[in-house]
Image (cartoon, coloured by chain):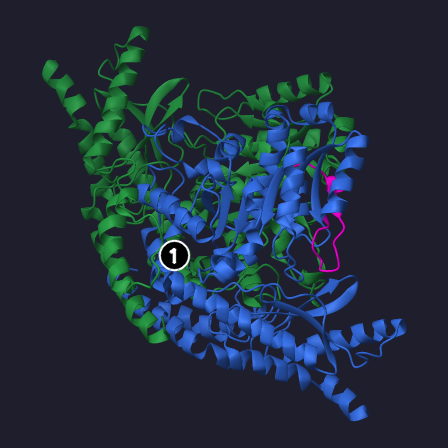
Chain colours: A blue, B green
Amino acid sequence: MDSEEFRRYGHAVVDRVADYMKNVDTYPVLPQVEPGDIRRKLPPSAPSSGESMDAILADFESIIMPGVTHWNHPRFFAYFPANHSGPAILGEILSAGLGVNGMVWQSCPAATELEEVVMEWLGKLLDLPDAFRGVIQDTASTASLCALLCARERSTGFDVNARGPDAWSERGALRVYVSSEAHSSIEKGAKIAGFGAQNVVTVAVDDRFAMDPAALEKTIAVDRDKGLVPCCIVATVGTTSSTAIDPLRSIGAIARKEGLWLHVDAALAGSAAILPEMRHLLDGIDDAHSFVFNPHKWLFTNFDCSAFYCREPETLVRTLTIMPEYLKTAQDREVTNYRDWGIPLGRRFRSLKLWFVMRSFGVDGLRRRLRAHLALAHDFERWVDESDRFEVMAPVPVQTVCFRFNPFKGQGTETDEGRIEKLNERLLDEVNRSGRIFITHTRLGGRFCLRLSVGQIQTGARHVEEAWHALRTSPVVEAWKSAD
Amino acid sequence: MDSEEFRRYGHAVVDRVADYMKNVDTYPVLPQVEPGDIRRKLPPSAPSSGESMDAILADFESIIMPGVTHWNHPRFFAYFPANHSGPAILGEILSAGLGVNGMVWQSCPAATELEEVVMEWLGKLLDLPDAFRGVIQDTASTASLCALLCARERSTGFDVNARGPDAWSERGALRVYVSSEAHSSIEKGAKIAGFGAQNVVTVAVDDRFAMDPAALEKTIAVDRDKGLVPCCIVATVGTTSSTAIDPLRSIGAIARKEGLWLHVDAALAGSAAILPEMRHLLDGIDDAHSFVFNPHKWLFTNFDCSAFYCREPETLVRTLTIMPEYLKTAQDREVTNYRDWGIPLGRRFRSLKLWFVMRSFGVDGLRRRLRAHLALAHDFERWVDESDRFEVMAPVPVQTVCFRFNPFKGQGTETDEGRIEKLNERLLDEVNRSGRIFITHTRLGGRFCLRLSVGQIQTGARHVEEAWHALRTSPVVEAWKSAD
């Protein structure tokens, strides 16, 4: 494909994306396909001869599009958002067009220096401590793994890196503390880093599903008595189930007193901290050693773009550094080589899209949109709360509402719980199958809950209203009404 | 930015990329900037109000472009290639436009099923064993880390995952065997996974820089005598310095006999195996448990796209699985949830670009281009070999030539080595500063070597000729000539 052919099809593809932005709400949010439906339309082998781009794009329409879950649909309320925006996509196109690998400064000076600058911009927006230095990673899972590795190496004097199991066994088991609501990536990271799942200690939460600092303190003391080695606390600002906010200030004081690494996982909720009125979410962040949040979740920057900050970047670099001859450059002493700030060696030019987003929206534009999403979530929370048959299942500190259908609201007994769960499983299946909205579920205090998470760029009042309408008029809810 | 504004700027940005494809050879390959040059042109904070896309794109031209290392320049011969192509960029644009997160089947059925299919296509192209199942990861570093984790868990009955250091200390140190020429990511991965650097055992190479199987066998025996626990062999097909090929068949026999996990890192050279005449590179792959190669290096698919194959996907999944309530879906038993096939939870829709590439080029088109690159590398090798003042420093099994300037060629003594190194350091600096070509260096058997690695999509005969000309006419070489 020469440059003129690329130009022609590039325009066509951009038009396709522009049309998609305009018409995305005409698709069922969740595709109406069964396992295997896509794959059986695809041939078993690659073609011998090249095919025309027209044929490929036609198949994209007829085979791929019917199997896409529309994350950027205004009625996508599942999981957490992974939103995009025009400026982010433009940055992504230029990044793909340049096709650089920013592993070291020399391999693309602009990629390295722009990344340093946009991480500083973002750090200021969140009012992070001055000492925090940032790097873009793919996801919070990977960033949190890096934090766990830093904690491991810091508490063993970089000896696990050097000697592995010998270093572990001399010191005893290193312990990682998380709330029972922490993200699964922490346990996964602890397994990868060799801590072992049994050393990820679950600390009890309060009735708001936030970590109980008193329980944390007690757990650490019990561990010390047993000869175990407290190493790291992972606090969550905005848990995945209900966006509960672990109290950073109290946890930070404990981390400081105990000499533990404190990692803060604010993957979703970190974005909210660019609002002065929500900055309280990060009160106490000064005691953290590392912090991650995902602009790709709720800051209009295409997936993937995770912002990882470290108060002691020298610990991060020492933990992950490699220095083979073929990667040495004349500038190594003067520059940042981001290769040593994460797991993979190769790195895409991700700062470009984040730069485009921050400049095109401006701080005011970003704040305005986040405020609108927060207000929509609180509207929905109020409707649920005021309804006779639905109930709110957790506080709503950010933009996600946990709720359920409960026809026994206000009169329920313990024995109804199983029945309520079944009703909500049916409701979830019904509304998602309808294609009108896509929501997901979780479990809080053992109870099955539905989640509505607001944050896609096109989501406005009427979309949240439609969600509420879809829920109230779903067959399982209607059936109950007529049985009344 | 609404859809019409996106359309307009999208066309502009595509035009910019098309022009870049056409004119990339007018840029200096390596930008003429010093550390800090880019960053000092950027303001210290994000703007309060949104800026126009015209202003942002103007800054992209004036600030960013002068600091870009042009990886897709036809005279980029540094590191290994990371090539792109029109079809790949089109796929990337659509992927960004959809903005999905393919972490589980439900979160984008098309992303999951297309990934399964293109990995099968690629597996057939490489004639991989039928049992191999593929997944796209970001880089070979991450894929090799997954392989090391599988090896660790397989040899401990998944006990390190469960119990961490207790599991290690009961068994003794697990050992990983690599050649002295293996990529730095293996040591990095072993440190991350908790093996410890001291348990990454370097096996001697032969005079072709390939792992010596006899030395491997002996090293394993010595370890067993000491009570250490052999766990994993990482064989490299195409080392980073010189693309040396570890002999898979002999190594595979040892792995089988010893019951060790065999991981094959063919990050660059794996692409060559789509050529029937080069498939011998993978002779013996049947004994491997895992295998990685990067279509983003030398298969015209934008960075990042690393193809990781596993003979026992159940081991991979069991090693990395997580199953929190909020990620459970009704289809979990019938589908692939790629979330459990790698480190990060979130996943971009990367299969799209690879599908576009394989269909648009066709197998024949891919093969034709790889053959042309191989021929160019061998031309360059011959010119160096026939020259009076340059010498080839290693066999050229693929598309990378290790060489050096040696004015004492054929008459050198040991004492000249230091002087030759200095001359080559100057030569490297001179040709890279000129902006005409970009090459990098390595060290082989202690000797400083220059590397010329062929593989960017636009690289043709005249570009390799220009490289050879730039080298022969560089001041340090010319000065020697006139001093003759």
Q: How many numbered marks appear? A: 1
Indicate the quadrant containing the C terminus of chain B: top left, top right, bottom left or bottom right: top left
In the image, what residue occupies the spot 41% across and 70% down? A57
Relative side of B189 to B224, left or right: left
Identify the residue under disc 1: A353
Magenta: main secondary structure equals loop
Task: Relative to A299, say whether A415 is above or below.
Answer: below
Residue in the image at 32% along x and 55% along y: A97
Q: Nearer the viewer, residue A194 or A484?
A: A484
Q: Amino acid at mark 1?
A: Lys
Q: Percent from the top left, x then y, of residue B88?
A: 39, 58
Q: Nearer the viewer, residue B447 or B266?
A: B447
Q: Position of residue A229 (x, y in %)?
A: 72, 31
- In which quadrant of the rendered view does residue B46 lie? bottom left
Camera-nearest residue between B394 and A242: A242
Quarter of the rendering occupied by the N terminus of chain B:
bottom left
- Relative image position of residue A475 (x, y in whole percent): 71, 86
